[in-house]
Amino acid sequence: MQSTDSPSIDADPAATSFSHSSRVNEALVAAAQATESHRYSRKTRVNYKGHVERVLKYASELEDPGWKTAFIAISMHTPTVLLAFIASKCSQSGYSFKTAEGIRSALKQYFEVTFGCQGDTWHCDEHNNWSGNPVFEATFNNYYRSLKNRDGRSGVSKQSLAASYSDMVRLMEHLQDRRTIEKMTEGL
């Protein structure tokens, strides 16, 4: 008795090939749907969408025609306008490196999905023949790294410090003090 998973010797090769390619296509569609649904969290997708909308609006308000379309059609202007947008946010408006990181990640993904940009390099000639992804352009990358260094050297921690043992002892003594307990339990 033959397994139902394997074709019989007398089976039509074209029909067998079709059923296998159909199963492969179904599996590829399922993989694409799973990737789309689960690659980025809902919050990340919402944040990325907001960054892309803001950068598209920024570019559309520029005067130079090449700059206006920098994110609609990739060109030699794309990394320059991306740099100008992030500089306007981080160097002029005071946003942190985390903002630049979010914008860069959103645009990297936007370029990958919208234009098929791949890899971790960028090249564009004077005829706008490009390869790679604009977020990896050298001048932009240097500015991006400088923002990272700027925020790392500022000396102001963006996170809380861990409590020391002596701080914890003082806190416990305070919480166990009769007056603190009376004050905290008033009105209960």
Image (tube, rainbow, N blue to C red):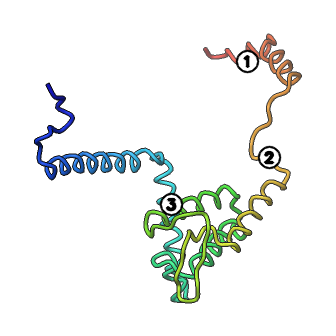
Crowding near the residue tagged with mark 3, few <14, some 14–19, many ≥20 C-alpha atoms within 10 Å:
some
The residue that appears at 41% across and 48% down in the rendered structure is 35
Nearest to viewer (mark 1 / mark 3): 3
Which residue corresponds to the image point at 57% horizontal and 58% vertical from the top-left?
A: 105
Q: Which mark is residue 157?
A: 2
Say if mark 1 contacts mark 3, CB within 8 Å: no
Q: Residue 183: which numbered mark, if any? A: 1
Secondary structure of the residue carrying tag 1 is: helix
**Amino acid at pointer 1:** Lys
Name the residue at 12% across, 43% down.
Answer: 11
- 77 over 18 or under it: above or below: below
Residue 95 drawn at (x, y percent): 68, 61
**Residue denoted by label 3:** 109
**Is tag 3's residue or tag 2's residue first in the polypeptide sequence?**
3
Between marks 3 and 2, how big is the CA–CA gap? Answer: 29 Å
Residue type, numbered disc 2: Ser
Viewer-side residue, 81 vs 61: 81
Q: For this view, does 39 lie left or right of residue 63?
A: left
Q: Earlier in the sequence, mark 1 or mark 3?
A: 3
> Do the residues bearing badges 3 and 2 touch, measured as CB atoms within 8 Å?
no
Which of the pair 100/169 is nearer the observer?
A: 100
Q: CA distance from mark 1 to mark 3?
A: 54 Å
Q: State the SS at label 3.
A: helix
Q: Which of disc 2 and disc 1 is earlier in sequence? A: 2
Q: Residue 63's x, y, as percent?
A: 55, 88
Q: Is residue 74 above or below residue 175?
A: below
Secondary structure under the numbered disc 2 in the rendered image: loop
Q: Position of residue 38 (x, y in %)?
A: 43, 44
**Few, some or many C-alpha atoms within 10 Å of disc 2 (few <14, some 14-19, many ≥20)?**
few
**Residue 51: x and y, percent?**
53, 62
Residue type of the residue flagged with mark 3 = Gln
